[in-house]
């Protein structure tokens, strides 16, 4: 992908620091768009990294240096994949749990209990409001 | 459904993310039984869920934040939140708790501007035989983390899930509730960005 496409190297002569900031922002913006991949993007490199072709084909098509870089990145990723939660963390989580789990925190999901007296009072109030509205209309 | 893309490797019988029963009981059903136990007052049963899912969730938080301390804090806060809202679980517990962790990571990324992060306090055994190889590895790790920090959270998330966690696009789609096509785009764009940032030095 051409750097110029992302807005790099434009109006970058005014100060010494601005171009770097704009460049980083441009990278974030450029790679956060979900648009159809171009022919260049759907390269053999991606197919290799997705396990669809072997390393030889990727190396022939994309060049040995790119494949070497991604081989190193993959090796580092493999190291991270072996990491496990430190033992003390699980113990810490268990000891910091509240006494009892919540059942439903959202108020609109909670069950409401109304006593018969309350129900009668609400019904009487609604009747009174209804009668008042009818009186006002007539 | 029995697929359990988030189970710890130690809890699985074969493969990662396949239809993997635990002790003969499909994990999704097993999770529901454990949740029922916890809600009935057996608080300690929640430890089974923590043991079952903490490693992949920790790796996700570590990959997203680059800091073991922050990853531990996010994991702890997420499990406490899950415990507090356990009665609201509808469907898969693993996907539900993953979304809590993933959202916490993205919130953290939004609030923190990282300039330099390394996987400090790395007590994992090294597979490199010479000091030079170890130095190269540390340099790449630092540069990779720096480059990852430049990515938008959604791209970093996709890259970490694909490359660090080793998930299939289908698993990712299930956990993130999006399409395989959209995730492929995110992963490809993340790779292109990382390559652009790293290839000058390493190619």
Image: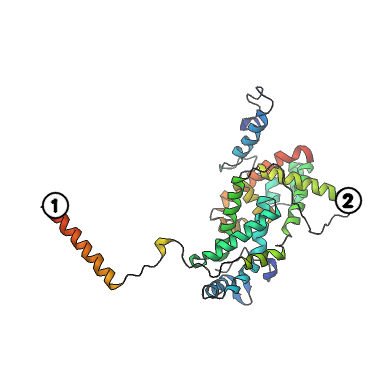
User: Looking at the figure, which quarter contains the N terminus of chain B?
Assistant: bottom right
User: Looking at the figure, which quarter contains the C terminus of chain B?
Assistant: top right
Q: In the image as oriented, which residue stretches furthest toward the bottom?
A: B24
Q: Are discs 1 and 2 both within one chain?
A: no
Residue A37 lies, with reference to residue A92, above or below; the image says above
In-front residue for pair B139/A68: B139
Q: Which mark is residue B131?
A: 2
User: Picture coordinates of residue B130 (x, y %)?
Assistant: 89, 52
- Give the quarter of the image for residue A19: top right
Label 1: which residue?
A: A136
Residue at the spot x=17%, y=55% of the render? A133
Between marks 1 and 2 in the image, the one whose residue lies nearer the viewer: 1
Residue at the spot x=18%, y=59% of the render? A130
User: Picture coordinates of residue B54 (x, y %)?
Assistant: 65, 64
Q: Which mark is residue B11?
A: none
- Give the quarter of the image for residue B96: bottom right
Tag 1, which chain?
A
In-front residue for pair A107/B157: A107
């Amino acid at each position: 992908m051409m750097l110029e496409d992302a807005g790099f190297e434009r109006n970058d002569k005014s100060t010494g620091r601005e171009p770097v900031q704009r460049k980083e922002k441009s990278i974030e913006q450029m790679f956060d768009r979900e648009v159809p991949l171009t022919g260049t993007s759907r390269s053999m490199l991606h197919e290799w990294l997705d396990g669809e072709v072997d390393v030889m084909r990727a190396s022939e098509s994309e060049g040995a240096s790119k494949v070497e870089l991604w081989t190193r990145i993959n090796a580092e990723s493999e190291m991270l994949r072996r990491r496990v939660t430190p033992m003390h963390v699980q113990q810490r989580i268990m000891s910091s749990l509240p006494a009892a789990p919540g059942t439903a925190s959202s108020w609109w999901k909670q069950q409401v209990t109304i006593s018969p007296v309350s129900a009668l009072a609400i019904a009487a109030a609604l009747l009174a409001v209804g009668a008042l509205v009818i009186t006002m209309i007539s | 459904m029995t697929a359990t893309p988030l189970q710890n490797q130690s809890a699985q019988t074969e493969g990662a993310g396949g239809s993997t029963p635990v002790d003969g009981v499909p994990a999704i059903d097993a999770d529901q039984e454990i949740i029922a136990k916890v809600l009935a007052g057996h608080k300690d049963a929640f430890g089974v869920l923590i043991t079952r899912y903490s490693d992949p969730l920790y790796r996700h938080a570590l990959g997203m934040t680059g800091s073991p301390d922050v990853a531990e804090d996010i994991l702890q806060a997420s499990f406490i939140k899950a415990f507090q809202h356990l009665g609201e679980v509808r469907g898969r517990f693993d996907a539900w708790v993953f979304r809590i962790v993933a959202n916490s990571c993205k919130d953290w990324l939004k609030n923190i501007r990282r300039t330099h992060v390394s996987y400090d306090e790395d007590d994992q055994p090294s597979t490199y035989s010479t000091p030079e190889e170890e130095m190269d590895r540390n340099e790449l790790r630092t540069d990779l983390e720096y480059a990852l920090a430049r990515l938008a959270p959604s791209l970093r998330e996709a890259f970490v899930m694909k490359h660090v966690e080793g998930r299939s696009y289908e698993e990712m789609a299930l956990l993130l509730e999006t399409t395989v096509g959209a995730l492929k785009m995110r992963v490809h764009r993340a790779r292109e960005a990382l390559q652009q940032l790293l290839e000058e030095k390493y190619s």
